[in-house]
Amino acid sequence: MMRLLCALVGLLWAAAAAAQDFSAVARLTDASVGRIFVDIPRGMRTGAGMVFGQGAGGRLLYLTNFHVVQNGGDIAVFFKNGDAISIYSGTVLAVSQEKDLAALSLDPEEIGTPSPPPLAIDTRRLAKGEAVVAIGYPAAADATMGRDMNIAAFETTLTGGSVSRVLNGSWRGASAELEIVQHTAPLSPGNSGGPLLDRCGRVIGVNTKGATDAAGIYLASSAGTIADFLAEAGLPMQTAGGSCGGEPASPPAAPPAATATDGRVPIWMILGGTGAALALVMAAMAVAAGGRGGEPAAPRVALTLTIATGGSRQRRGIGRASLQRGVILGRGGAAEVAIDSPRVSREHLRLTLEGRRLMATDLGSTNGTMVDGRPLPPNQPRQVGEATVLVLGGEVEIRLRAGS
């Protein structure tokens, strides 16, 4: 009995030590992992990835899975730092279907931002049983968050495990063999492309899939496979070597404090008036709220209107599907958003989501519509965003915000 108790105490001590190590790994690496959203014909795909270097002109180099960007259109990558979000647009630089890897160049979305530090890649031989950490954005976690997704959607999830073995195999029956790490850190859709790390915060793989017919079997492209892919693409990377004794390296220096123009701004202010970015965030929120990595489900509220009339103020939420059909604002019974003002026409304004653009159209109103102080000609749609101020009939002020 005493031997059993001692063994249990030892296991508890080991678990506590591992948790402490994993916490340090999170502090060291979290800022360098970003959530990727990719436009696809069916809607929006999401996954994870990491910064591995810098390109010309201060651009970031970002690594994810090929299947995350496959057949995709526009790409946006979101990094969370505290209560702030940085947004980058992505361009594919190189892909390998056999290795299931893709390298992207990331550009700040119209504004400067402190660069997430690159993670070092360690190609050493891994030991069976050594501790590993997976970081990503599992859809199963998204599904539990509901209406809080406006900030929680961009918080990473950390899972811990150990190396089961290193094997030679292939993805999807490809002919070329590559080195794959089998491990026990749980993965689910949304983790694809995220880093597999050792306790020192060094990249030892890119998480790719879990076995569909067995529990506790998760697979990642090894650091050696990553290094081969980047070398073939002619892209630089930071490397690390030597054994990991379990003590993480010191975290990189904190970036400069955020300013009004550095891009690290609260989620409700991240769009800066770009309608395309507004629509992309709304689509990203839809994927997160749906809890799936492929076709999104519409969130309860995609856009919130704050309507000020005289001394009163009201808020009205609108769903994504309604915006795609077109939402009419006005005083009459046909208006989906009713505004009680004699200066507002019965059918005054229509808001429509066209692809990734939010458009405002004056429907021939009597007293007109102003967009940021400029008249909106009747029946001539104009793109709007979160920084836009709409004034209906010279009296009613409307401000827009993505989400609830």
Image (cartoon, rainbow, N blue to C red):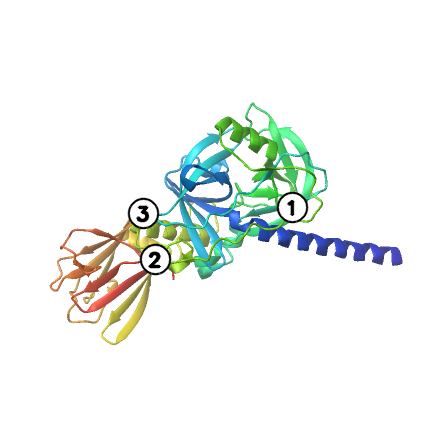
Q: Which mark is residue 200?
A: 1
Query: Can I make out residue 137 in this image?
Result: no
Q: Residues within 10 Å of mark 3 (few under 14, many from 20)?
A: some
**In the image, 321: left or right of 22?**
left
Q: Can residue 274 be seen at all in this image of the molecule?
A: yes
**Label whose residue precedes the other's in the sequence (3 or 2):** 2
Give, as a three-letter code, the residue at label 1.
Answer: Cys
Q: Which mark is residue 319?
A: 2
| The residue positioned farthest toward the left in the image shown | 366
Dot 1: few (<14), some (14–19), or many (≥20) neighbours within 10 Å?
Answer: many
Helix or strand or loop: what does disc 3 sit on?
loop
Q: Quadrant of the N terminus?
A: bottom right
Which callout, 1 or 2, points to the residue nearer the camera?
Answer: 1
Mark 1 and mark 3 in contact? Answer it, CB < 8 Å.
Answer: no
Q: CA distance from mark 3 to mark 2?
A: 15 Å
Select label 3 or label 2 by which is in front.
3
CA–CA distance between discs 1 and 2? 44 Å
User: Residue 230, position in %: x, y?
Assistant: 52, 31
Residue placed at 32% from the left, 68% from the top?
A: 315
Q: SS for tag 1? A: loop
Q: Reply above or below: 248 against 193.
A: below
Badge 2: residue crowd in 10 Å (few <14, some 14–19, many ≥20): some
Marks 1 & 2, CB-CB < 8 Å contact = no
Farthest residue in the top direction? 175
Residue 2 higher or lower than 248, as above or below: below
Q: Where residue 241 sits in the image (x, y, percent)?
A: 65, 37
Label 1 to label 3: alpha-carbon separation:
40 Å
Question: Which residue position holds label 3?
Answer: 356
